[in-house]
Image (cartoon, rainbow, N blue to C red):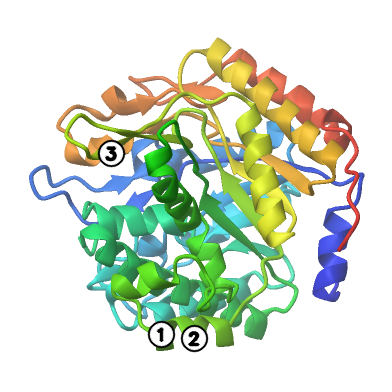
Amino acid sequence: MTSLPLFSKVSSLIAPQAFWWSTGIEDTFITEPWPSTGRILDEYELTGHYARWSDDLALVAALGVKTVRYGIPWHHVEPERGQWDWSFPDKALGRLIDLRIDPIVDLVHYGLPPWLKGAYLNPEYPDRVAEYASRLAARFQGRIFWYTPLNEPRITAWYCGRLGWWPPFRRGWSGFIEIMMAIARGIVRTVQAFRATDPDILPVHVDATDLYETRDPALTDEVERRQEIVFLALDLVSGRVGHEHRLWPWLLKHGAREEDLAWFQENAVDLPFIGLNLYPMFTKKRLQREARGRFRIRQPYASGDLVAQLGRLYHARYKSPLFVSETASVGSVAKRQRWMDDSIASVRQLRSEGVPMVGYTWWPMFDMVAWAYRQGTKKPADYFAAMGLWDLNPATLDRTPTPLVSSYQTYVAGGASAVGPLNFVAR
């Protein structure tokens, strides 16, 4: 890729004939042990990817995809502050480049190195993550152009700040906002580091999507507020959170400072691509009232139209090219196949409407270990989530192909024709 103005680079990737089929390997890294079990959560270790990385990347190539979302374990790259070990990214990312597969590199997927005390609330976090990003970008300059600064900032803030399950173990909405502000600042600093290191880099901002609904008119305001919170990370980093923002009073009420919010407006970054992480079993949220007057959230299994609903929402708000950056269904092969077919049909519908949906990612490529493992006591195989194109053998961790492999290969081989033309007019 040669150096081009940002608009030209983006435009070349949203041409009618362009569509990126992709996959990825679950790469959650939580390095802090759960107090009662002593367990950490390193998906690459639990699924055997560290040992099988070469074979796994050969499976990626066998799908025919030209793009893969791929995470780098910062805690291994920088095991002690200032001590760098590039052996894993050198061999894994180098192999993808040799295979002519463009990685979208996940810099941070929830977890941080243990030496970064206080995790996201360490005052040095924004500078440390920017340094990490800059060093990696410089190492692969001219070879890798797509990076995700931080996967799912909202979910990170939820588990680290609202639930208190991940470091630094804050709880409540004030904790959520405190973590979110720190995460968003780190994202901005990372993008700034990319610009200074390699102007050819295109940041790919990926967050978890939720679609809120209710059948109770009394909960309409809460549904609207929750839906706005879904967009908060992207709104912050792109400088959209001003006095007129619907969440402004709520943010100040729960501890955000006006000067910090102003910093994001002064340092706003572009959103050249937005990745939507969505799952039929998690993404739809229905608020309802309990007998005692409190409300609770249910997660009904969604139809394939979920993709179209979310694509329209994000396009209306940001006008950026979109791609499905994670999706899969848990369950039988037949259930996974239905979701694949229905969700891809929904992508086709969006493109016919002129929504610039430019890619689709089946994630994870093979089964993952559910996050409950860290807090549980059973063996890892008891936490396998059947979501992949390949299943994991519980005894050997061998990757067992399912009929989904050939189905996905067929879609990938169809290129953009498998999802129809993009009737998009640049604005």
Q: Is residue 380 above or below residue 267?
A: above
Q: Position of residue 158 (x, y in %)?
A: 33, 54
Residue situated in front as seen by the camera: 199 or 142? 199
* The C terminus: image quadrant: bottom right
Earlier-in-chain disc, 2 versus 3: 2
Residue situated in front as seen by the camera: 324 or 370? 324
Residue situated in front as seen by the camera: 193 or 61? 193
Q: Position of residue 36 (x, y in %)?
A: 7, 44
The residue identified by callout 2 is 262
Q: Amino acid at mark 3?
A: Phe
Please state if 256 lies on the left or on the right of 387 as rendered.
left
Q: Amino acid at mark 1?
A: Glu
- Estimate how packed mark 2 is, as few (under 14), some (14 to 19) or many (20 or more) residues with alpha carbons within 10 Å: some
> Which label sits on residue 403?
none
The residue identified by callout 3 is 295
Residue depicted at x 46% and y 17%? 331
- Marks 2 and 1, how far apart at CA: 6 Å
Please state if 425 lies on the left or on the right of 41 as rendered.
right
> Which label sits on residue 258?
1
Q: Nearer the viewer, mark 1 or mark 3?
A: 3
